[in-house]
Amino acid sequence: MEKYSFFTVEEFVRDDYFRSWVLSEHPETEHFWRDFQNRHPERKAILLAARTLFLSLHETQSIPTDEQGRRMWAVINEATAPDPDTEQREEMAAGRVRPFWRWLSVAAVVLAALGLGWFVVLNNSEKPASLAGQFVEKTLSAIEKRNTTTRPQHIHLSDGSRIILYPGSQIRYANPFEGKTREVFLSGKGYFEVTKDEIKPFIVYANQLVTKVVGTSFIIDAFAEGKSPRVEVHTGKVKVFTLEKFRDAQQGRPEEMVLLTASQQTSYNATKKSFATSPIPKPNKTNAPQIHPDFNFQNAAVADVLRTLEESYGVTIEYNQQTLKNCNITAPLNEEPLFRKLDIVCKTIGATYEVFETRIVVSGPGCDL
């Protein structure tokens, strides 16, 4: 704890433990930083300035250049320097903190120095709106929409893509899309049906994740209140990055991300800095079965049944073909969800299945002739 007694604003912003506290509000980190402020009341102002600045930079989704960085810290030093006024000097010496709006203004000045757009909406409690700081570079053509109703709202984008925006959620995007990408900033939950364009990828920034697609349908659930952001793919394929890794990829470093295909989902734990990937609990059909319409199986080989489920739901099912080669099944499975279908198939032939991340593994003794 004592090392933080001498940290500057910049050092706090760069510190992983400090950043995890700001982003996740985990009980352990919350206790640590509350205790730190009680022991070092003279550091509260610096700590609050660092927290405000980090949140602002984090939400802008922007990568400062070296020159911008130098200008930024010059502004910070000037903005956080002790006020020459005697009364304010005495207040700082006594450990009293400047009002929260003062540090918001510092962050706003810093972002202005960086040349970044930043908007803050303050309510009665002086808290920034959940989309504060998220921006589209050409703000003159940017649109922001908020769903303040109790029903999902349908939004049509200039490229033909469609978004279903859930209650309590917000999005911001350019209309029309300009440049080499189609960028959307989401706070909350949205369902996306993206028009395919291999030249101009579709990128969604949400909470701490960046989702990059060409053409697909998926859900992003990224409300900020301590909940792990989640991406769920219905059709197609997406790449999911942390914001940090996405920036690294933009700068030419190898891509570190999670690749999701149909019927897969992933969630991100900010404290552990890790993804948890698995099949969607109730996946939708992505393709209608051709050989067995309505999943009506009549004395069908189990290998054929499992292959039909793979192709129809876009999942990966692994099994020992040699062991199950003599297993056949007759069952009408048309109304059952995927995992109920698997329950019936496995129970019929005395097998079991397990889910390992994105794979479904079927195992059993086989069937005697």
Image (tube, rainbow, N blue to C red):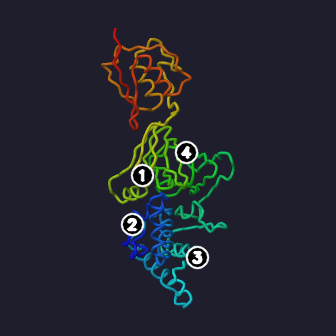
First along the sequence among labels 1 and 2: 2
Q: Amino acid at mark 3?
A: Pro
- Label 3 SS: loop
- Label 1 SS: strand
Residue assigned mark 2: 15
Task: Give coordinates of residue 266: x percent, y percent.
Answer: 45, 44
Q: Amino acid at mark 2?
A: Asp
Find residue 99 and name its label: 3
- Identify the image quadrant of the C terminus: top left
Q: Nearer the viewer, mark 3 or mark 1?
A: 3
Q: Amino acid at mark 4?
A: Phe
Disc 2 packing (10 Å; few <14; some 14–19; many ≥20): few
First along the sequence among labels 3 and 1: 3
Residue assigned mark 1: 241
Q: Residue shown at 38%/14% (left/top)?
A: 327
- Label 2 SS: loop
Q: Nearer the viewer, mark 1 or mark 2?
A: 2
Disc 1 packing (10 Å; few <14; some 14–19; many ≥20): many
Residue assigned mark 4: 192
